[in-house]
Amino acid sequence: MTVWRRNYHLSLGLAMTVRKDGIPTVVFRQLADYSLGMTGGEKWRKSNFMLNIQYLKHFFRLSWILAKMKFKLKNEGSYLGVLWYLLNPLLTFLLLFFIFHDRLGREIEKYPLYLFLGIIMFNFFQQVTSESSWAIKENAGLIKSIAFPREALIGAIVINNLFSHLIELVVFLAIAIIFKGLAVGVIFYFILLLFFCIFNFGVGLFLASISAYFTDLQNIWSFFVRLLWFGTPIFYIIAGQNRLFTINLFNPMYYFIEIGRNLAVYDQLPALWLIAGLAGFTLASLIVGFFTFQKLKNKFAEMI
């Protein structure tokens, strides 16, 4: 390894040495430091507010550490770096646009923006949930070696994919400027993004906890997400299709994508029933995911 490349690694703070269990040494040391600072095997407690605040602080800091680790390792030795994050949504966008813009897109105002925003929002959901379904077994070495808030594994996945999504949003803004469709309401999209992250975090917790006990869930979920892609109005509209509209009332992605388009594409306030649906799915996701994870996480080390 050349001197400049070794210095580059050191400037990133990424120790390239790896333990026998596959854990990068620098990550293990930082997790150990935080673990020692967690008095009494600190955990979420219903009756102690200050301990819960301390637990949340550890959770966010560990999530950030793990997200940085994953980002650095993923881009190690890559010449294109973050540009790889754009290839999948851009190629999907170009393919669907050239196939459908004269057919399905003819009746949709600002179709390029309509299509691209739908793609990157669904891509965010797909990546977070798919990675979460593997999170426990993929990090078996960490879980068996050290005590830390297991929820941080899912938090790291959300943070890492949030970074990718923000890069994709830059491309969205560029497309909006090219097609002269930049909406002021895009500012409020970031409020929606906060709820979207919470929703994905809840779903990720649920999938991670169940997949530790039921390995086939990863394949089942992959198939389900593929069906959900076609059922969600990403490259088409559901106006006049009553049966499809009724089905999408039970599809949380419909609410998020529809509100996102209202704000960032059409500069409109979303209908109250859309906001209510979004809030309901976000809260339900967080509650179900959190309590399922809390119930099952104590036996993760045994199951993996």
Image (cartoon, rainbow, N blue to C red):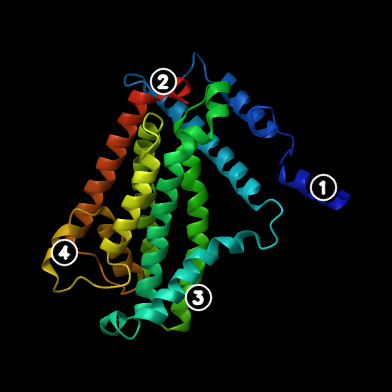
Q: Which residue is mark 1?
A: 7
Type of amino acid under label 4? Phe
Q: Earlier in the sequence, mark 2 or mark 3?
A: 3
Query: Alpha-carbon distance for marks 4 and 1?
Result: 56 Å
The three-letter amino acid code for the residue at tag 3 is: Ala
Cα separation, mark 2 vs mark 3, equals 46 Å
The residue that disc 3 covers is 174
Q: Helix or strand or loop: what does disc 1 sit on?
A: helix
Tell me the distance, in whole angstroms, between the alpha carbons under discs 4 and 3.
Answer: 31 Å
Q: Earlier in the sequence, mark 4 or mark 2?
A: 4
Instruction: Point out residue 201 in the picture as x, y percentages from the top left corner.
Output: 39, 43
Residue in the picture at 47% in, 29% down: 150
Pointer 4 or 1: first along the chain: 1
Q: Nearer the viewer, residue 151 or 265?
A: 151
Identify the residue at image location x=12%, y=64%. 243
Q: Amino acid at mark 2?
A: Asn
| Residue on which the image places disc 4 | 245
Query: Which mark sits nearer the N-terminus, 2 or 1?
Result: 1
- In the image: residue 35, left or right of residue 197: right
